[in-house]
Amino acid sequence: MKIELIWIFVILLCLHCTTYEQDKNTKMMGDSSENKIIKSNQEWKKLLTPMQYHVTREKGTEIAFSGKYDNFFEKGNYYCVACGSELFSSDKKYNSGCGWPAFYDKAKKNNIKEYSDTSHGMVRTEVTCARCGAHLGHLFNDGPKPTGLRYCINSEAMRFCPVR
């Protein structure tokens, strides 16, 4: 049983760690945002660390339970690491046990876009920053009340600012 669980974890980890292009079946589900930020790959590479670039621009993911905000519950707000757009608030964060920071709702309705993601043979909802298009993570329908949602977000895609 332990060996089977380890193999399942390794397979899931490999699926999440691979860099992938958004495929032809991806359909937009969100609305557009004003003040869009468009930069070249070289410009993003100058602004972001290699891991931040991998997660936000190449749709990568950090290893489960490795992110600095996974088991982090200080009061404050989470902003897009690429453009500074407000994404989530600590009052909507919870411990899902999934290995990534989890939120049951977003801070502002129009700051996050959702897309159908059929990569890796799965059907999921990708979550991106509406302003700069940064990949943040994925959205699942297994969260707590009142929304029933779980925004599973990479720590590398966010910057935390405490409430003072």
Image: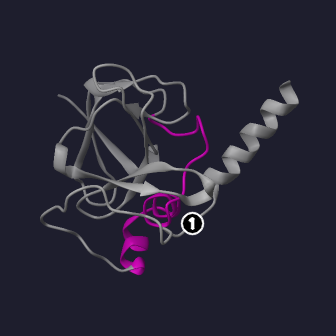
Q: Could you say where residue 45 lies in the image, as x and y percent from the top left?
A: 43, 72
Give the secondary structure at mark 1: loop
Residue on which disc 1 sits:
20
Quadrant in the picture for residue 135: bottom left
The residue shown at (31%, 77%) is 39
In front: 77, or 125? 125
The residue shown at (21%, 38%) is 107
The residue shown at (26%, 24%) is 91
In front: 133, or 124? 124
The residue shown at (50%, 69%) is 23
Quarter of the picture holding the C terminus: top left
In front: 90, or 151? 151
Q: Could you say where residue 158 lies in the image, as x and y percent from the top left?
A: 36, 47
Q: Is residue 43 magenta?
A: yes
Quadrant in the picture for residue 90: top left
Task: Specify whether 67 is left or right of 131.
Answer: right
Q: Is residue 14 above or below residue 88?
A: below
Q: Which color scheme is applied?
A: one colour
Task: Specify whether 124 is left or right of 82.
Answer: right
Quadrant in the picture for residue 6: top right
Q: Could you say where residue 88 lies in the image, as x and y percent from the top left?
A: 27, 38
In front: 62, or 15? 15
Q: Is residue 132 above or below residue 6?
A: below
Q: Could you say where residue 75 lies in the image, as x and y percent from the top left?
A: 27, 25
Magenta span covers which residues?
A: 41-69
Task: Specify whether 16 is left or right of 102.
Answer: right
Quarter of the picture holding the N terminus: top right
Task: Tell me which amino acid carries mark 1.
Answer: Tyr
Q: Is residue 48 above or below residue 121?
A: below
